Image: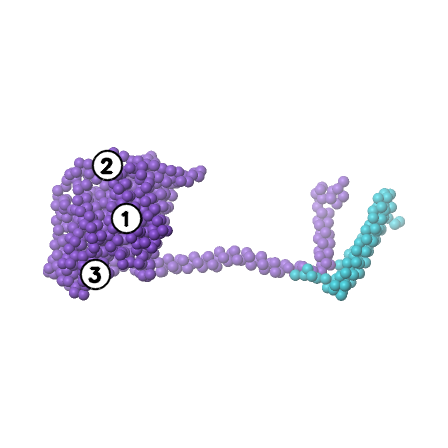
Amino acid sequence: MVTLNHYLLLAAALFCIGLFGALSKRNAIAVLMSIELMLNAVNINLVAFSHFLADTAGQVFAIFVIAVAAAEVAVGLALIITIYRDRRSVEVDDFDLLKW
Amino acid sequence: MIELAWLIPLLPFAAFGLIVFLFKNNRKLSAYIAIVAMSIAMIISLGILIQVINSPETTEYSLTWMKMPGLEINMGVLIDPLAAVMLMVVTIVTVLVQIYSMGYMEDDSSYTRFFAYLSLFASSMLGLIISNNYFQIFFFWELVGLCSYLLIGFWYSKPSAADAGNKAFITNRVADFGFLIGILLLFVQFDTFNFMEITEGIESLNNPGMLTVTAFLVFLGPVGKSAQFPLHVWLPDAMEGPTPVSALIHAATMVAAGVYLLARGFILFESVESIMTIIAYVGGFTAIFAATIAVVENDIKRILAFSTLSQLGYMVMAIGLGSMTAGMFHLTTHAFFKALLFLGAGSVIHALHEEQNIWKMGGLYKKMKVTTTTFILAALALSGIPPFAGFWSKDEILNVALHENFILYVVGVIAAFLTSFYMFRLIFVAFFGEENLELHPHESPACMTVPMSILAVFSIFIGFIGAPFIEKGFGYYINAGHHVVEGLNWGLMINSSLIAVAGIISAWLIYHVELIDPEVIAKKFWPIHKLLYNKYYIDEIYGWLINNIWDRSATICRWIDLKIIDGISDGLGNFTRGSGGKLRFIHTGQLQTYALIFFTVVVAIMIFLASSKVTAVTMIIGGGI
């Protein structure tokens, strides 16, 4: 039997993988991809709850999240392009102007 | 006329203002303004005196100057016979000294500044006399001290004069510190500064310990201002000022302010037995101490300065023995003949072009008849020869001493002998004997000799106002406390006259006829002579104390201030900076670091919330239903 716990575990695993990537990747685009991964993990969580609790609210929320994720990626990529044009690099290690 | 009393200090103050702001460069006008202002003040004082003699009561006017809950300070005027007599003394002597200064300071470049300062001093002194509360008297007390500083250091380019001015002011400040605390204690106990109200309050007080401390502290004021031992050190050095200043301030008026305060606050002192004893002994000791030093001094002004110290000691001793009458009477007579002595000394110094050593003078009577005559008259008055003024007042004091404290009576008699001895030593050496051929003395101009002659008349006759055979004399108007000694004491009068004459004869034998050579005596008793000549080394002792104890403590305090107190405040600052300096490394500038910290903390909070049993916490986790 596949219970709710399996889906939740999957989502948690995906979230942690995405989190690890977001915190440790050097390439900004890789960070964006990891963030996408985290959002998708949340989506799995929402849909799983919606299925097992028989409440459509979860799926509706998931669609919202997809739309927001798409918009956010668009804006994020635009930012990266702008930074690249100024600093000639996409490594997040190079964006340390707030350094001590 | 009493309603015009407030004008008395105001007129010389206005003169000061006019001279300083408008007439700084006009010599004649400055002198005239000062003299006219003082003369009007003198006339008003005379009017007040006549009014008070006719109806001897106390009149008081008072305005609220500042009022806060718990503190009320008034400015006011208090006129009673005591104030009226002091006003008369101060105004007369000031007018005469100002007229004298027109001649004495003629060659001085700061002529107008001198008259400005004299007027300021006069206004402060007069304000002090008519004060009706301790706060106001303290205010004028300090102002008088300031004027003394300005006038002693009048020739400020001379280092010794500047130092003397500092010494006077600082010594007085030490005394005034105690005085101020005493005044504050009075306020704490009686809730008022007013003399009259405190007098009433004392009668119904039941805390003798506090009153003793208060009386002692208030007594410190006169110890400084009237130059009693041990704060007498400033008065001999104050002779650096011009001679009219010495005559006015350091003989007749300012130093008398201390005695005046003792008289004003007499009830306060009288109610504490032990303080009266201390006052009497301090006065008596000063009297004989200063008299012994005067015997070996060679500078004419210094001899007179120590004589002033000695007479002030007499006045303070009299008050300490319980007779405010005797103290104030001696103050009144002393003002006149001491001022005359100083003016005479000034006349001599001026004529001999600033020579002040009596051994360089001699035979002055030949060319300076008026000066010599007035000087001798004043010296006779000071020595206590009847019927001159000093005899009556000094005998009044000795009479009280005889009844109250035999030791102090003996001290007084010895000091009287020494007084006539050193005064006539001065006269025989400076005015008689061989002339010094290098000096060419001449008699002083009229504006100097006329004031001296007027003072001479006072020195002869003023004593009669307090003589025992007068019905309503000095004692009738000015008295306080339960102490009145009546009647003529022939034994005492004859005794003191003989002692004074003995002093004169001894001086004549040693310094004029030279039966015994003074040099031989000095060599034979050289340890005593050395001690006296160095003024008992008091100045050296104070210098040692200040250098070693005071300066060392100051260095320690400075070290504490620098290292410890600054260390703490700087340390806090340094600590903040240092910790900031270490903590800044948290900001790596990289987003990922920040994000890591966020998530770590969120996880930590979640664990914490999950492990605690609080209902609100479970609600937060459960989604807040």
User: Chain B hue?
Assistant: purple
Residue B470 appears at what percent x and percent y?
17, 38
* Chain holding disc 3: B
Residue B465 appears at what percent x and percent y?
19, 41
Q: Look at mark 2 in the image and give the residue it sits on.
A: B53
Q: Look at mark 1 in the image and give the residue it sits on.
A: B35
Asked where in the image residue B543 lies, by quadrant, the reply is bottom left
Viewer-proximal residue among B183 and A9: B183
**Tag 1: amino acid:** Ile
Q: Look at mark 3 in the image and give the residue it sits on.
A: B352
**Tag 2: amino acid:** Ile
Asked where in the image residue A93 lies, by quadrant, the reply is bottom right
**Tag 3: amino acid:** Leu
Nearer-N-terminus badge (2/1):
1
Nearer-N-terminus badge (3/1):
1
Q: Secondary structure at mark 1?
A: helix
Q: Residue at x 88, y 50 (%)?
A: A2
Give the crowd class for mark 1: few <14, some 14-19, many >=20 residues within 10 Å.
many
* Chain holding disc 2: B
Nearer-N-terminus badge (2/3):
2
Does the CB distance between marks 3 and 1 fall below 8 Å? no
